[in-house]
Image: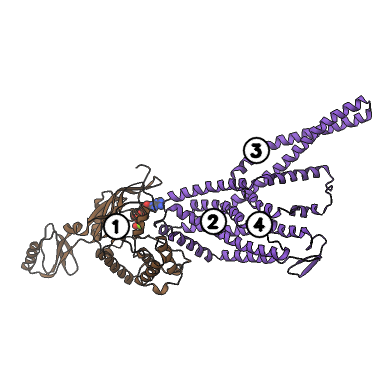
Amino acid sequence: MTSLLAILKESWLSLRAERLFRVVMGLNILVIVAYASMGFTDTGFTLFYGLFEEESEYINTHSPLAKTLYLGIYSAFIVNIWLAWAASILALISTSSIFPKFLSEGSVELVLSRPIRRTTVFAIKYVSGLIFVMLQVTVFTVGAFFAAGWRIDVWDPAIFLAIPLLTLFYSYLFCVNVFVGVLTRSTLVALLATLLFWFGTFGIRTADDQIQRFWLMSETTADESTQRLFELTAEIEQASLEDQTKVVRELRAERRETETDLANADEAIERLNPWKSAIGFLRMGLPETARTLGLLHRELERGSNNTLMDLMSGRAFEEDSDYPQNEFQKRRMDAEEKSYERELSIPGWKIIGKSLIFEFVILACAIWIFRRRDY
Amino acid sequence: MAAVIDIQDVSKSFRRKVHALRGVSMQVDQGQIFCLLGPNGAGKSTLVKILMTVIRPSVLSGSMLGKPIGHKPTLRRIGYLPEHHRFPSFMTAGQALHYYGGLTGMRRPARRRRVEEMLELVGMTSWRNHKVGTFSKGMQQRIGLAQALLHDPELLLLDEPTDGVDPVGRREIRDLLLQLRNEGRTILINSHILAELESICDQLAVLVKGRVAMEGTVDALTEGGVNWSVSYRDASLEWGDSKIEQLEDRIVVTLPGDSLHQVQSTIDRIRDAGGSILAVSQNRESLEDLFMRALKQAGTEDAASPGAVRGRKK
Ligand SMILES: Nc1ncnc2c1ncn2[C@@H]1O[C@H](COP(=O)(O)OP(=O)(O)OP(=O)(O)O)[C@@H](O)[C@H]1O
Ligand SMILES: [Mg+2]
């Protein structure tokens, strides 16, 4: 027990000595201060602590949209962009050195020659890296919680979900970081490898999402065309019985068109299929970084009719949504809706479980190397 | 006397290519200062690291303090000073000692007391609140020694403890080691500074290319190495087999063996020839002589060249 505390203390001192740690802490507080600077009045909203005032009939104290907007900014911009990208990169830069520094020649002997098992040493060191991130997110989340309470009178404990979710998210990257760090004992290599891995997963995820969407679009077209063809055949039969030549001609023209649509859609599906399975397979082995953070949005948007996506696309302001006129746009919207719903239907435990399996496998390899290594 | 370290046939090959240790067996007795000597790359540090579980041996059987080697809880009873050690540079001397004490499992109150005592012992009390990263090499070495002694170990493994320490400090360390031995502790030292070990070494082993080339107590090893030398001038004599050294103002004849009778007859011979005796002295074989003898005994012609034996073949 004493030795565990000693390692934790050492990690803490080492983090505190990092200038970057303090810089990130300061930036976090700045972002929260900026977030809290937006306010709502009876007739609109204010920016920069009341410096600018804007009239708005949609966004004011009485409108539910204000709440959606304010929480949406939190989950979509602050968590997704600031915490998930900017702050995470900064955190990676400062935690990349934890293991290489720890394992550097001359200092590792002093630790390994103690009555502690190597696995224990590894585990504590790993956890201390995560604590670093957790600390930052906690400071941040507490700030956001009070900002939301003050500005929109929403005291939503779901905001605190950001702490475990972001820590989880970070741990998917950190395990790769530690693995490479243990393998190469080089801070720079570990950092670069992690960034590469991160952008790699990001690329694969984006590709997978796009392919899924196109695939869904093509499938919808194929389904609709098949359906329409059935109807057309029946209608043509009916019309020819009634001897309406002109109608028959028009219907035949439409049938030809629909047949082309169907053929095109089938061809697209055919062509997408191998990519879809290949990229889907790749994605299966990778941790779900974005989906893990997506769980936070789900919780924050629960109970609200509009999502920030609706707000931004303007859908929330439409009385009835008949606005996508063009056929293609409509299909696109449908496919987007469908894939969004599909996204929502994936249970949280599955997303986290799958990612944790990845993390455990990587950590097991890292521990295996760490235990067998001669220093 | 019980053997504190008793190892048989320790081997270590790095990546199956560099054979750092090739079947080392040795016993270190309780309450002794044991010197582990050998050329660069002979495997001394590797052996000590194996004992401290920092390196995994390829083959090993043996025990340390009555427990099999690799038994983690036993490490609490051992103090270790690695070679080229480095402390976390962001820690102060006090923090670093608390850290290592904590790692060994010392509780806070005990640690507090011992840290003060150790800083005092190595003369670094006034530097307690300064960052270790700013210390000079010798100062770091002192903190390293303090760290090794912190938990009051029964056995000390010191890898080049006087590296970088100034002459006064070396002398202090030497006295400290003698004091620790007199308290019944066992000390194993790796060092190249043979002159320094001369006065404190009880037992020794010389490693050459991963094998023990010579082992035993210093007394036993140097027993056959005692001889006498007589310096004189103003006489020219023939000495047959005896070794003669012709210096500027004198001639030194070295008589093999420890025979006082032979010394007397030699003196008589010189005086009879009209020579004047300048000095008569008894010489013991120095550690350096022993070391050179061990290298010769090792047999292989490149025994003195640095580095371990390499090659795929076992
Ligand atoms: N971690 C390692 N990986 C690969 N080879 C190693 C490692 N540690 C030591 N060696 C090799 O093992 C051999 C013995 O090294 P060791 O450090 O034990 O020598 P030494 O006797 O302590 O030498 P010195 O007097 O220079 O300190 C050397 O040839 C060295 O190159
Ligand atoms: Mg060495």
Residue B48: percent from left, percent from top: 34, 55
Chain letter, brown in picture: B
- Between A71 and A261, the residue placed more toward the observer is A71
The N terminus of chain B, quarter of image: bottom left
Of label 3 and label 2, which has the lower sequence position?
Answer: 2
Residue B37 tag number: 1
Supply the letter of whichever chain is purple: A
Q: Nearer the viewer, residue A213 or B240?
A: A213
Beta carbon at label 4 within 8 Å of ligand 1: no
- Which-is-in-front pick, marks 3 and 4? 4
For disc 2, the neighbor class at 10 Å (few under 14, some 14 to 19, many from 20) is some
- Compute the Cα span from label 1 to label 4: 66 Å
Badge 3 or badge 4: first in the primary sequence? 4
Q: Is residue B34 visible?
A: yes
| Amino acid type, callout 1 | Leu
Q: Position of residue B25 (x, y in %)?
A: 28, 50
Q: Residue A342 carries which label?
A: none
Mark 4 highlights which residue? A158
Q: Which amino acid does label 2 sit on?
A: Leu
Please tell me the numbered disc located at residue A188. 2
Q: Are marks 3 and 4 in contact (CB under 8 Å)?
A: no
Please report the residue visible at 85 percent of the width from the left and 45 percent of the height from the top. Answer: A325
The chain holding disc 4 is A
The secondary element bearing badge 2 is classed as helix
